[in-house]
Amino acid sequence: MATVQLKNIKKVYPFISGEQKKSKKKKADEPEKKKINLQITDEGVVAVQEFNLDIADKEFIVLVGPSGCGKSTTLRMVAGLEEISGGELYIDGKLMNDVAPKDRDIAMVFQNYALYPHMTVYDNMAFSLKLRHTPKDEIDKKVREAAEILDITQYLERKPKALSGGQRQRVAIGRAIVRAPKVMLMDEPLSNLDAKLRNEMRAEIIKLRERIDTTFIYVTHDQTEAMTLGDRIVIMRDGYIQQIGTPQEVFNHPANLFVAGFIGMPVMNFFDAELKREGEKYFVELGGYRVELSAEKEARLLKNDVQSQSVTLGVRPEHTDLSDEGVAAKVDVSEMMGSSVHLHVTAEGRDVIIIVPTVDMKGNYHMGDSLHFSFGGGVAHVFSKETDKNLEF
């Protein structure tokens, strides 16, 4: 239904009157301060900075990151609920910076449902159409079609207080889709649900996007939601974009240490290691274990003319293997997870997690047991000690 472009978008919250005077006067050579993940400047608190993103028609984009990273603020700027401090927002090629929210042809689903408690489900879903003076028969058709899609037809005459959290969220989504908006905005819509309901609603949202021709922008701090829902993921930190890519791209090729540690569960293991360049070959050395990187990784490192250096080595728990030789480790905890066992070990002075499929386990491990683990050259990620960036990119 619509393309969305955000060009160098910025959001600054000005100081409240008198607030700046209370803070100590900044010296000329003093660097800008950071407080609670947000940058403090003479203008005020910078919540979002240098945000550039082109969203294709009918694409499902997920903004993900820790609390306070600016993802909800960005979504609210697209919705028109927050003023844009700098940059340009386009929807379908039209500049929207100063267009009122009601005229942007967007719909938003909030975290807390935001349903009218005195109205029935039917009236909640029909409300925006009534405001537009839509004919009654058309309202009835759209509401019932949306209710059918979301499997809430049987609740149309109930009020929100008589519904469960999952049912209320379906109503909130239904209220949004009856308008057939060009852009659907969703701000952590599943965060108030329990784990089982979240799984069910994720599946419902996947089905929903196949049935309605709308561009989605979805905000979450849950990486599982991001990985399962998004065509592309935008990973944010402290108001800046860290990486944009498909779920597979950000998982397999993290741009920096933050992305590597944020995407993936359990989190990636990190080590202090050495990267050795020998001609056109690259090796990583860790605790006496030496492995040549894959040809694909070597080609990228060669292209960047990366030299031998100390690096932060990242290896995901699922990419480690128990072996007769490799990095020495001692077992701290063994967790049976059903199809796999999570071994928490200490290696090279770091806490490390090794995931072993149950079918590959050759006996049980207990606290204090010694073992060795290894990993392949295709799953080793090398990050700069100085910049935290992936040296391949």
Image (cartoon, helix red, strand yellow):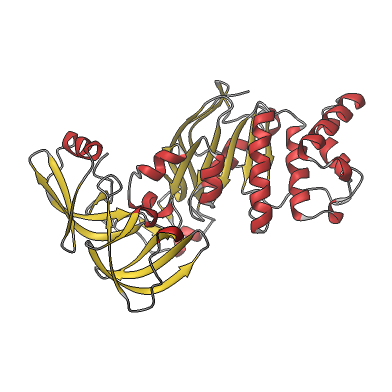
Depth order, front residue of 239/28? 239
Residue 241 is drawn in which quadrant?
top left
Residue 72 seen in this snapshot: no
**Residue 164 vs residue 334: left or right?**
right
Residue drawn at the location 15% of the way across and 62% of the way down? 288
Q: Position of residue 18 (x, y in %)?
A: 51, 59
In the image, farthest residue toward the top: 93
**Which quadrant is the C terminus positioned in?**
top left
The vertical placement of 370 against 33, above or below, is below
Residue drawn at the location 75% of the way across and 30% of the way down? 179
Residue 29 is drawn in which quadrant?
bottom left
Depth order, front residue of 178/336? 336
Depth order, front residue of 48/177? 177
Residue drawn at the location 39% of the way across and 77% of the way down? 366
In the image, farthest residue toward the left: 279
In the image, farthest residue toward the bottom: 368
**Which quadrant is the N terminus positioned in?**
top right
Residue 351 is drawn in which quadrant?
bottom left
**Residue 342 vs residue 63: left or right?**
left
Q: How many marks?
A: 0
Q: Position of residue 178 (x, y in %)?
A: 77, 32
Q: Position of residue 188 (x, y in %)?
A: 61, 49
Depth order, front residue of 342/140? 342
Residue drawn at the location 15% of the way across and 45% of the way down? 282
Residue 113 seen in this snapshot: yes
